[in-house]
Image (tube, helix red, strand yellow):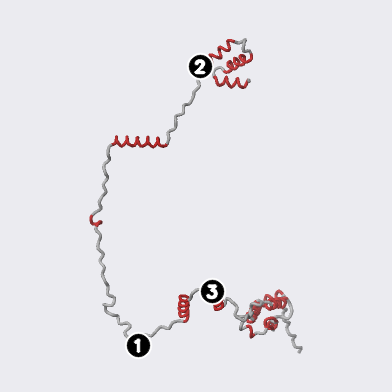
């Protein structure tokens, strides 16, 4: 209650403490304080309540009408505006120049007499590559896509995309058929005489031979080429291998006793 009285006193303004005390006395002793009631009534008489009057919002149609009316009134005040005239282009720009086409006779001039002897003119020999490309273009121009599955199989067989019948697991390996399988497996014979009989270098090259013997995708010539590449490499590093002990140094022959 006290808080409400304080709020009312602050809203009324003036001497807030006196107003607060008078309101409390009125609330606590309503019959014994007639003077406070009169004072309170006097205070309340001077109060006014301000109420905001909201103007009715105009509709969009009314806003458009008002804008049109203001525009018409402004035009009527200013008067009619003079018409704008387009500037004409100069006469020499408007007229298009006629394009004169002059014919040139390529064969009517004087000849240079460079290719006079027709017997010396020989046909240029056509290279095989250009001939193959020309034939390929002709074939592509005439060839139509396969109309059924059998024609598609025939086309794939010509392009070597399918196995030929009867099925051969070594199709395309005609050269390898002439080589015995032992040439693929036993490759230690190619280590003689350059590879030492003992030591880490011998052990390494034996592992290389085992790996090459299990490789089914290399030919015999390719495997031998790998071994010879290691031979050339170790020959170039022979001094370093001797210093590290990978190759045992050859003992010098004993001198003859005189």
Image quarter (top left, top right, bottom left or bottom right) of the N terminus = top right
For disc 1, the marked residue is 119
Percent of width and height locating residue 97: 25, 61
Residue lying at 67% horizontally and 85% vertically, measured from the top left: 180
Check disc 1: other Cα within 10 Å, few if <14, some if 14-19, many if 20+: few
User: The residue tagged with tag 1: helix, strand or loop?
Assistant: helix
Image quarter (top left, top right, bottom left or bottom right) of the C terminus = bottom right
User: The residue tagged with tag 2: helix, strand or loop?
Assistant: loop
Per the model, the C-alpha gap separating discs 2 and 3 is 109 Å
If you read the primary sequence from the N terminus, does the residue marked by circle 3 or circle 1 appear first?
1
Q: Nearer the viewer, mark 3 or mark 1?
A: 3
Residue lying at 34% horizontally and 37% vertically, measured from the top left: 71
Percent of width and height locating residue 29: 63, 13
If you read the primary sequence from the N terminus, does the residue marked by circle 2 or circle 3 appear first?
2
Residue lying at 23% horizontally and 55% vertically, measured from the top left: 91
Where on the picture, by quarter, is residue 197? Answer: bottom right
* Residue with the most extreme bottom position: 258
Percent of width and height locating residue 224: 65, 81
Residue 46, numbered circle: 2
Q: Nearer the viewer, mark 2 or mark 1?
A: 2
Residue 39 against residue 242 in the figure, above or below = above
């Amino acid at each position: 209650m006290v808080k409400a009285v304080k709020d009312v006193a602050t809203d009324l303004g003036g001497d807030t403490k006196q107003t607060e005390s008078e309101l409390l006395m009125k609330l606590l002793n309503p019959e014994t304080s007639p003077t406070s009631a009169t004072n309170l009534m006097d205070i309340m008489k001077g109060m006014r309540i301000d109420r905001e009057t909201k103007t009715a919002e105009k509709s969009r149609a009314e806003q458009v009408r008002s804008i049109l009316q203001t525009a018409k009134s402004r035009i009527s005040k200013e008067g009619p505006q003079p018409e704008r005239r387009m500037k004409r282009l100069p006469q020499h720009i408007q007229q298009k120049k006629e394009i004169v086409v002059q014919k040139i006779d390529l064969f009517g001039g004087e000849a240079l007499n460079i290719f006079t002897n027709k017997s010396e003119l020989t046909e240029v020999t056509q290279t095989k590559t250009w001939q193959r490309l020309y034939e390929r273009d002709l074939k592509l121009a005439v060839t139509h896509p396969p109309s059924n599955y059998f024609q598609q199989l025939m086309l794939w067989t010509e392009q070597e995309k399918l196995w030929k019948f009867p099925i051969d697991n070594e199709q395309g390996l005609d050269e390898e058929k002439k080589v015995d399988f032992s040439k693929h497996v036993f490759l230690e014979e190619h280590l003689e005489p350059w590879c030492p009989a003992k030591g880490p270098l011998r052990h390494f090259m034996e592992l290389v031979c085992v790996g090459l013997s299990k490789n089914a995708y290399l030919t015999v010539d390719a495997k031998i080429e790998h071994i010879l590449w290691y031979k050339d490499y170790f020959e170039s590093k022979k001094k370093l291998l001797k210093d590290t002990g990978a190759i045992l140094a050859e003992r010098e022959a004993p001198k003859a006793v005189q």
